[in-house]
Amino acid sequence: MELGRFWRHIAMTPWKAAQAFPESALEAIGRRVGEHEKRHRGEVRFVVEAELTTAQLWSNLTSRARAIEVFSGLRVWDTEENTGVLVYVLLADHKVEIVADRGVGARVSPAEWQGICRAMQESFRAGRFEEGALEGVTAISLKLEEHFPAREANENELPDRPLMI
């Protein structure tokens, strides 16, 4: 385990996470997800995790591996057209991961997702958490609109409200 990473996770607290993503930001992100999901058949789930446990750090769990665990645990994969997309923010590591279900993954390249992640991370480094999250949700939604435009029946299969874990 990298000692610097360990101390970053110890220093990150739920209070600091709530400072970065206050209730007003969570509400704005949820509204943006809901607005955009009316224009496409994808399902976007936004999750913020402050820090990993000591056991997770000892096992060298990466932000990507944790994002995949969260994707599975929240059943983001369980949508009618396999169009679930998880945006996972690990604050202590200053990382953003996007995990897309196989329906979306077949049409949007990993490089496109990485570009969105990098843009969000840059905003977060500058302390613009809400702005970066909103821009990220919009960028993801534009990809989904391109490949999965809305139909008349456009059921909302996953919660729009971000989750703090």
Image (cartoon, helix red, strand yellow):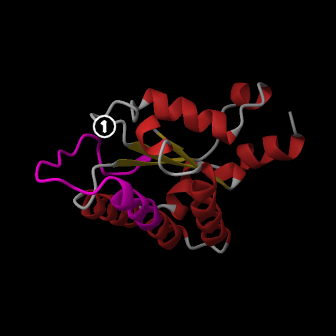
Three-letter amino acid code at disc 1? Glu
Q: Is residue 52 visible?
A: no
- The image quarter in which residue 150 lies: bottom left
Q: Nearer the viewer, residue 11 or 51?
A: 51
Q: Which part of the image, by quadrant, shows the N terminus?
A: top right
Q: Is residue 143 above or below residue 164?
A: below
15 relative position to 5: left or right: left
Residue on which the image places disc 1: 81
Query: Which quadrant of the figure has residue 10?
Result: top right
Image coords of residue 120 (percent x, y) = 58, 65
**Would residue 159 be counted in the magenta stretch?**
yes
In the depicted view, which residue is nearer to us: 155 or 52? Answer: 155
Q: What percent of the width, then of the height, locates residue 14?
A: 55, 48
Is 161 magenta? The answer is yes
Q: Could you tell me residue 34's position as x and y percent?
A: 26, 58
Q: Which residues are magenta?
A: 137-165
State whether residue 130 is above or below residue 159.
below
Position in image of residue 149 (x %, y %): 27, 57
Q: Residue at x 57, y 38 (%)?
A: 67
Q: What residue is shown at x 41% (from left), y 39% (from top)? A: 103
Q: Is residue 17 left or right of residue 3?
A: left
Front-lying residue, 49 or 156:
156
- The mark total stands at 1
Figure quadrant of residue 125:
bottom right
In the figure, is residue 54 to the left or right of 147?
A: right
Q: Residue at x 80, y 40 (%)?
A: 6
Judged from the image, the secondary structure of the residue bearing numbered disc 1 is loop
Viewer-proximal residue among 26 and 14:
26
